[in-house]
Amino acid sequence: MQLHIERRAEIALRSLQKNEQNQINRALNELLDLDRATLMQSPRLNILASGFSSRKLFVYKGSPTLRLVLTFDDDMCVLEDVVYHDRLDRLVKREGQE
């Protein structure tokens, strides 16, 4: 699988501590090693149920505290953002209340 990293994800990656960057880099390498069918079966990947976008957003557990927000286009995986799981949970809950 090919990986494209959006600018906001690059900025988020640079702002992480070194150990967090290492955890995310390991997770990204795991993503690249999997084909899409296998990845869709992974317990670390979930669809993001939200009305934020018309695209299907997925969340991949990059570390115990960080999540990778992804989209897919054929054999291309797009890293949209890297967020802390608690912040992502708050955003999703807020969207569900509106």
Image: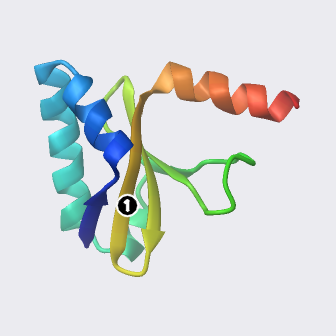
The one of 32 and 94 positioned closer to us in this rendering = 94
- The picture quadrant where one finds residue 35 is bottom left
Q: Position of residue 88 (x, y in %)?
A: 55, 29
The one of 7 and 87 positioned closer to us in this rendering = 7
**Residue occupied by mark 1:** 78
Q: Where the C terminus falls, by quadrant? A: top right
Q: Is 64 drawn above or below residue 74 in the view shown? A: above
Q: Is 40 drawn above or below residue 83 in the view shown? A: below
Q: Amino acid at mark 1?
A: Val
- The picture quadrant where one finds residue 84 is top left
Q: How many labels sit on residues? A: 1
The one of 6 and 37 positioned closer to us in this rendering = 6
Label 1 residue SS: strand
Q: Please, which residue is most extreme toward the front here?
A: 7
Q: Please, which residue is most extreme toward the bottom here?
A: 74
Name the residue rendered at 75%, 48% in the picture: 51
Q: Is residue 40 left or right of residue 97?
A: left
Q: Residues within 10 Å of mark 1 (few under 14, many from 20)?
A: some
Q: Please, which residue is most extreme toward the right here?
A: 98
Name the residue rendered at 71%, 46% in the picture: 50
Q: Is 33 drawn above or below residue 85 in the view shown? A: below
Q: Position of residue 61 (x, y in %)?
A: 38, 40
- The picture quadrant where one finds residue 29 is bottom left
Q: Position of residue 92 (x, y in %)?
A: 68, 33
Q: Is residue 67 left or right of residue 34?
A: right
Q: Position of residue 68 (x, y in %)?
A: 39, 42
Name the residue rendered at 35%, 65% in the picture: 77
Name the residue rendered at 25%, 73% in the picture: 1
Q: How is the image coloured?
A: rainbow
